[in-house]
Image: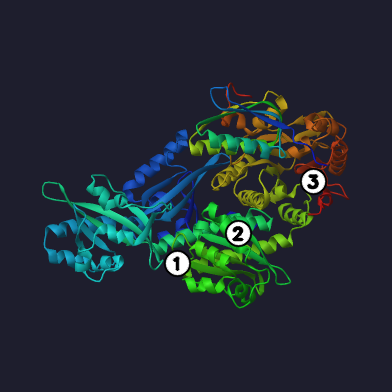
Amino acid sequence: MVRPVRLEVRVQPGRERPTLAVDGELDLSSIPLLAQHIDAQIESEQEALTLDLSGVSFMDSSGLRLLIELNERAERDGWSLSLIAPQNESATLVLRMTGADRELPFEGPPLS
Amino acid sequence: MALDLAELILDRAHNAAVLMDEQGVVTYWNPSAERMFGLAREQAVGRRVADLIVPERLRETHLAGLERFLADGTGPVLDKRIEIAALRADGGEFPVEITISAHRDADRWFFHAFIQDISERVHGERDRERLVEELRAALRGSERRFDAIVGSLTDPVTIRDREHRFLYANRAALAHLGFESWEQLRETAPATIMSDYVVRDEHGEEVAMSDIPSVRLLRGETAEPLLIQTINRETGVQRWNLLKAAPLLDERGVLDATIMIIEDVTEQRRAELRNSFLADAGAALASSLDYEQTLRNVAELAVPGIADWCAVDLVDDEGDRKTVAVAHVDRERLSLAEALRSYVPDRVDPDEGLGRVLHTGEAVVYPHITDEMLAAAAVDAHHLELLRAVGFRSVLIVPMRLGERILGAMTLVSAESVRTLDRFDQELAEQVAARAAAAIENSRLYSERSRIARRLQQNLLPEQLPAIPGYDLGSIYLPAVETSMVGGDFYDIWEAQERWLIVIGDITGKGVEAAALTSLVRHTLRAAAEFHSSPAALLSFVDATLKKRPSLSVCTALCVALEGDTATIAVGGHPLPLYMTADGVREVGEHGPLLGAFPGARWQDSTLRLTAGSTLLAYTDGITDAQGGEEERFGLGRLCDTLVQLAERPAAEVIDELVRRLDEFQIGTHADDTAAIALHRSADGATPSGRETHAVLRTGTITTPV
């Protein structure tokens, strides 16, 4: 049985920095979709990117890997990445469990 | 384990490797260190590093640095490359590049250093500086002394005045520039000489006269050495040169002329390019088990790595060929390449070109394609027109063969670059083609998904669970259905230093690379367990190993060291293990960071007494993330509810019930790898007779036909 991808990505041009708002479940099946959006965004705007994950209801280790890779890429290519943490507690579990909540550029106070 | 794997690897390392303890005393010394310092292992181990390889004038600093690190943990020299002088046993000094890391084992620090001898590099730079000095001195003195030094030098040397006219060229320079006599050169304008060549820098950008270091000096700029490739427009011969310029100043310090030394670095540069090309090709070949995609990746790499065009043909059992990849440096010209390819019949002439290569398995090279050759090869007028439009310079066709079997051929064409494909290109292309053939064969052999999964799994999981006295064990391994994700979860159980180690982890990554990483992590853990006793130190060691890899390599891991009824637990980015007793189920241990991901990461050991009848369950997130209906996940709550009912039951029962509950909950198949290990302490502390170990290893779920 093939599950539908339960993820939605919206570009929010109105903000100060280009922002991608992500809603839904961030796992193996939905990672490629988000990665495509991010690539397209970085290609058009090389200075900064905010990834708003506040609408993410689930995230697994493959979602985390994408964030770590994106952070490395931002550091290497010299643009600024900013993350807004998920509000759903179970979605932040993988971030807290791995120490990523402290190491990745999340806005606001630490999760744990 | 009698054989220490880490030592086995270090024993074969090209770099010298030295281990040192808190007292600064050598505890390990590899064969490369023996050669580099001229000191046998027996002579080195047990003595202070300060007395062995640190020159006397640096000894104080070395000892003070060690002391300071032990006192307050500051180590400014740690984990970076440092150039410093080292001492050989015979008292001679030589320059080295050294990288030192500190590790904590239990309550003690130890340090390891990798050392590389860089004498040659340093001397090369010094020689050139000295040469320029001598040139300056000589030019102020007599002409004869100058020519004696420079005339016989094998590197081309030229001197030009402020108007960039040649004042001097040694014999090597004349030959290099293609002139027979000094008079002939003097009468030729410098720009004319350059126009005989296509000149590009190392990035392939065209180099103008104004970029040449000596010309930059004349403009009053500083002139960094410039690496250029030149292709003779007439012969198509390619050379790599390193241009270095120095100013000649008159008595008042005004620039009078410039000296330029042209170093021929063709061999080195080509060797470098070959190595990096083969490394990239190796990575491309290992990137996917879909061989047509793999071949397209390799063809893309071959341009401009080797040539301007690359086509890959495969041949089937009937001898019919099929083009599976065409790549061109200029994407706009790809359609021309494809149009031409359509003229090649499926059954090719076994005596000519591609047909001959597929027939004989030997490479064919056409260094200079002439118009007559094109006319002879053309089928009709339109074909000839297309052929002429390409502007062929050279063609090289190499077989993709495996022993006696010929799987296909790679065709490489140079056109736009005007470069003649030579023996070097042929060797490189043959190596790539041989690797591609092996990759095709591999992916054909293992194209059945279930077979890949089973094979890799067999290699990545212990063959069977060992029997641990006083415990019974159970395990689950349910691989993800999407087999491109093979290499996700792993676990391992083994005995080291009179205790049992239990490790479970999750590598996020894809395909063969992730499988390789899994095997690296397992082997690193097994090797490190021989000299680290604490699980936190083991995780730290794996973390350091992962960080040294060129591409992002991260994993979660949970490590338990079991000694009698005491379990020491360290957790890196992994779900905490669950401790099950008659009183209930709770998480034990402390969360620590993911391995390989973050700088300055630290892990904590936690200790736990396993009471009789209790069970420790270590699992991967495949269990809690398993998907049910209505966007539901199995979750920690459901897992604990399941386990509460299983307190004090044998490990086999825990495992079977857990698998049953997962199957019941789950809609569809496993999206991610799922693994768990249950460790049950027998009620009476003795090994129960009968089933001590029980493994649920399900590979049957992945028989989806390709």
How far apart, in angstroms, are the residues tagged by discs 2 and 1? 23 Å
How far apart, in angstroms, are the residues tagged by discs 2 and 3? 45 Å
* Numbered badge on residue B420: 1
What is the chain identity of the residue bearing mark 1? B
Q: Position of residue A95 (x, y in %)?
A: 65, 31
| Amino acid tagged 1 | Thr
User: Is residue B487 found left or right of B61 in the rendered image?
Assistant: right
Q: Are marks 1 and 3 in contact (CB under 8 Å)?
A: no
What is the chain identity of the residue bearing mark 3? B
Q: Position of residue A17 (x, y in %)?
A: 54, 25
Quarter of the image holding residue B454? bottom right
Q: Are marks 2 and 3 in contact (CB under 8 Å)?
A: no
Q: Are marks 2 and 1 in contact (CB under 8 Å)?
A: no
As rendered, which of B241 and B192 lies closer to the eye? B192
Q: Quadrant of the C terminus of chain B?
A: bottom right
* Numbered badge on residue B525: none
- Residue holding disc 3: B478
- Residue holding disc 2: B338
Q: Residue at x 41, y 59 (%)?
A: B37
How far apart, in angstroms, are the residues tagged by discs 1 and 3? 55 Å
Disc with the residue nearer the chain's start (1 vs 3): 1
What is the chain identity of the residue bearing mark 2? B
Tell me: residue A43, above or below residue B434. above
Q: Residue at x 67, y 62 (%)?
A: B440
Give the number of the mark in front: 1 or 3: 1
